[in-house]
């Protein structure tokens, strides 16, 4: 049975997720740690240091990019204020490649990748400190489409640099780790003959970096610690996408490409400690993953996803979730109106979504969500 839709233009959840949602509203601090990684040659046991608490009430703003002429402007906007909010930085848009970014888990800084003529075809990394807007620049060239994976305390950031592909589309990839406080960086892992290598997140204690590798054998999860890498689990025999590590680092949710037809993309959940993979009972395509704060159950988007618009008479629109607010009250999601059950080809509307409302992130076409950040004083 589904939870009855609320009045307004928000979303509703299947009953299986209702307890998780209610619990999330009570959370006002960082997720508590629990041990998850079994003994291995690169394990350091099950002891994790305490993290500084994050006051969810202070992280009620969003950072986003809006294209303006030949520039991409980074704005910070509180939920209750109208767009556009406050401009904190501007990046040149080169070769129509717009700046991309990811906010730190503590909401006090933003990592940005931007292409410049001197770095083309690669991008340069900048880390902006909020609310001051001061920036630290790094000189290492990085892939423009590289994921930016923050450690839970915001002290480190992982990104990738790939070689140009060979005639088979394979690349060599260096994974780099950056320390914003010192401005230092280092190569922590290297993979050869892969189609794609992606840093997807750190363990809660920051000691391990989880990496997804796509190659001719399929999709696999690896872990790096102290410069050593180890294969952890198989995600699937083919392509995967939309990887998202759970807040406590114990699970990886993702989408697996399973073929063509009515259901070509299906949600999967990997338990990292055991390597067990579970699927979902959806009958339609799923796209995008998000985790409610404190929940062990991910939310999948798409026509076959866990979230449904409460007022959607034609049932053609669907949500691809991007990120919940730290208090679990608001979801930033991309709303697609396509009827072909596939993302791409139709620009989505990026919106704040609650059980009772939907608010557009920006009126500027092409605006992109960067993350939840602390309110600017």
Image: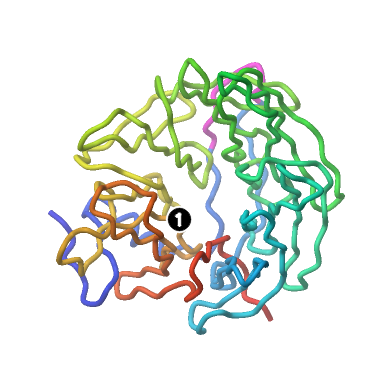
Residue found at x 43% / y 28% = 239
Could you say which is closer to the camera, residue 134 or residue 194? 194
Q: Which residues are magenta?
A: 35-43
Magenta stretch: helix, strand or loop mostly: loop
Q: Position of residue 245 (x, y in %)?
A: 50, 41
* Residue at 71%, 69% in the rendered image: 90
Camera-nearest residue between 159 and 229: 159
Pinpoint residue 109: horizontal percent, then vertical percent.
Answer: 70, 61
Residue at the limit of the structure toward the left, as seen here? 1
Q: Quadrant of residue 164?
A: top right
Q: Residue 315 sits in which quadrant?
A: bottom left
- Report the side of 244 relative to 63 (left or right): left
In the image, 12 versus 237, the foreground residue is 237
Residue at numbered disc 1: 322
Q: Is residue 40 magenta?
A: yes
Write the residue at 58% across / 20% down.
39
């Amino acid at each position: 049975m589904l939870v009855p839709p609320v009045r307004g233009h928000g979303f509703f959840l299947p009953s299986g997720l209702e307890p998780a949602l209610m619990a999330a509203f009570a959370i006002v601090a960082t997720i508590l740690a629990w041990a998850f990684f079994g003994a291995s040659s690169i394990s350091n046991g099950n002891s994790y240091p305490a993290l500084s608490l994050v006051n969810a009430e202070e992280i009620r703003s969003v950072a986003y990019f809006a294209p303006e002429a030949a520039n991409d402007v980074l704005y910070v906007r509180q939920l209750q204020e109208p767009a556009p909010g406050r401009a904190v930085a501007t990046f040149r848009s080169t070769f129509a490649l717009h700046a991309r970014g990811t906010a730190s888990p503590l909401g006090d800084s933003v990592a940005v990748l931007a292409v410049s003529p001197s770095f083309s075809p690669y991008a340069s990394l900048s880390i902006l400190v909020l609310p001051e807007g001061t920036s630290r620049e790094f000189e290492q060239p990085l892939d423009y489409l590289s994921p930016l994976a923050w450690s839970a305390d915001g002290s480190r950031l992982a990104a990738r640099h790939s070689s140009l592909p060979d005639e088979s589309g394979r690349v060599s990839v260096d994974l780099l780790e950056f320390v914003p406080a010192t401005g230092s960086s280092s190569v922590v892992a290297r993979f050869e003959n892969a189609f794609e290598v992606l840093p997807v997140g750190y363990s809660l204690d920051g000691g391990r970096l989880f990496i997804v590798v796509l190659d001719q054998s399929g999709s696999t999860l690896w872990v790096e610690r102290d410069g050593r890498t180890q294969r952890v689990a198989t995600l699937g025999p083919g392509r995967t996408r939309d990887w998202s590590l759970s807040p406590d680092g114990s699970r990886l949710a993702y989408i697996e490409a399973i073929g063509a037809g009515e259901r070509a993309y299906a949600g999967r959940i990997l338990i990292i400690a055991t390597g067990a993979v579970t699927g979902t009972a959806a009958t339609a395509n799923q796209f995008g993953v998000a985790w409610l704060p404190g929940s062990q159950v991910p939310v999948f988007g798409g026509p076959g996803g866990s979230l449904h618009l409460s007022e959607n008479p034609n049932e053609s629109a669907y949500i691809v979730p991007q990120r919940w607010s730290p208090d679990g009250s608001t979801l930033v999601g991309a709303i697609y109106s396509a009827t072909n059950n596939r993302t791409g080809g139709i620009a989505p509307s990026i919106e704040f979504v609650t059980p009772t409302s939907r608010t557009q992130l920006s009126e500027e076409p092409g605006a992109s969500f960067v993350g939840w950040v602390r309110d600017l004083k």
